Amino acid sequence: MTKKIEEYNNLRLSWDESIKELGRMKASKGGHTSIFMYPFNYKFSMSTKAVIKALKNSEWIHHKDDSSDFHKFSKLTDYVGETLLGNNYIFSKDINKKYEIWVDGIKQSSCMILTIEVVFFENNIAIISFFTSSKDTIQNISSVVNRELRNPSCLYFDEKNLRILSFDDYLPNIEELKKVYIDTYNVIKSFNDYIFSMIGEAVQFNEMISGRSKYAKYITAIHVDVPKALEDNLLFSYSELQHETDVTINLLHICSNHLSTANDFITNNRKFEQDLDYIRNNIKRYGIRLWSLWSGITSLNSLAIVSINDGGRSVVHQCNNETYLIFLINFYIKLRLQYLDKIIIDDSFMQQNRARNNLENLFILKAKYFSEEVADSFQPVIIDKKVKMALGIDLLMKDIEDNIVKTNEIIKDNNSAVIAIIVTIYIGLSELIPYLTDSIKIKTLVIGSASIVAFLLWKKRNIVGQKMDAILRRIGVI
């Protein structure tokens, strides 16, 4: 037994060295993409036609049904393309600039911002996407590019020197660092100012009303050419470590995904660490393994895909196209569901008409954006299911449906109580008035007026109930 344990430990040590070697390797030519998706609420400042014209004048490309330059839908079903292009407005702009990435005043890496894409969804939700690439090592792509660009609140753009500056607000000397680079003499913009100035005044943006998160959602895909010996060591050599294969080729991308995990950067020195248990648990829940040289893992904030050698050279192209659209649609669904979940309690409580509208909106969302098969091939279908699972869309949908049912039950009970009170008042007046007057006109006027007041009270029962609650609280009854 002792010998077997020793042999296993030696295998693990060898495997760990292979991970480090993989992390030090650079992505192949054209072998990296990271797409960052930032959500906002928006409002057009003018008519839709005028907004489209203004964006076109600012060199934005409008992708519509007859566009011949938008091929992202080619591998997906027509349903997906019709949903996105039929109900929303999609614009893109080529940037093609190489930026240095400076973290807390120190140059750490660099990346190309290739394209910025904006999708103006229904219900005033916009998602702005950055398409980036880098030729850095796998570890630096994960620990610098993905880590910094996912947090827009820390980002500043220095267009003069083509630098992206990132500052960690937890650092004790952060204000001093900022003053060195951000002052009135430098043309440096915060992330929001950089984006909004590009789009112009035709669209007004605001932070999300609901579903707001500090971090952007992102997709990262890397292809790397590795020596045959390393490939064997990572994938095939040790049957005892078969389960570790997926861990190996995902580890370097997910280990900086969540601040709440032990594997993130340590605040003061940004040390890169690895948490194997965290990766194993995520793979067990959300892993995507399609074949031996192509593997991915989804989590709350990201989808990471790694391929090596000839096994998956097209993975970067796929992520920039069909995989991106799948994630984008699911991200919108999640944001919309979060909004519906919020207003069910905030706005529709005790208001039957609004509860009915929310249920209708939920059904419309499902009808428009949910599809059992987003593509005719198995890869996008699997990715779609895993992304939905990782984002918690199905669970959130069920919770909302349950909340609507419970809200309707409460509304029904409250309505019954209000109606009973109104009927009692009406019957009481009907019995009392004959003793006070013999005039048919007065009886008709009083009972008619009581009926109108009773109807108005019933229509405004939620407001009346809230006012009564406020009065009773003020006098200390409740």
Image: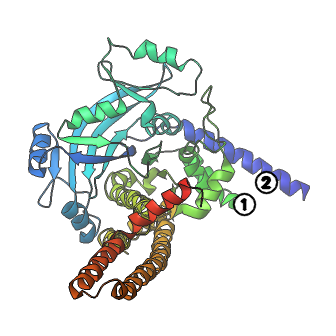
- Residue 364: quarter of image: bottom left
Q: Helix, strand or loop at disc 1?
A: helix
Q: Residue at x 23, y 47 (%)?
A: 43
Q: Please name the colour scheme applied to the rendered image.
A: rainbow
In the picture, measured across the screen, residue 54 lies left or right of residue 302, that is: left
Image coordinates of residue 230 in percent, x first then y, are: 58, 46
Q: Is the C terminus in the top left, top right, bottom left or bottom right quadrant?
A: bottom right
Q: Is the N terminus in the top left, top right, bottom left or bottom right quadrant?
A: bottom right
- Residue 280: quarter of image: bottom right
- Residue pointed to by mark 1: 240
Could you say which is closer to the camera, residue 475 or residue 280?
475
Image coordinates of residue 187 in percent, x first then y, are: 30, 18
Q: Residue at x 50, y 18 (%)?
A: 175
Q: Can residue 295 be seen in this snapshot?
A: no
**Amino acid carrying mark 1 in the image:** Glu
From this view, report whether residue 412 is shown above or below residue 237: below
> Which of disc 2 and disc 1 is earlier in sequence?
2
Q: Tell me the tag on residue 471.
A: none
From this view, report whether residue 341 is shown above or below residue 276: below
Q: Tell me the tag on residue 8.
A: 2
Image coordinates of residue 211 in percent, x first then y, are: 44, 52
Could you tell me if the residues under marks 1 and 2 are in contact, i.e. CB atoms within 8 Å? yes
Mark 2 closeness class: few <14, some 14–19, many ≥20 residues within 10 Å: some
From this view, report whether residue 259 is shown above or below residue 364: above
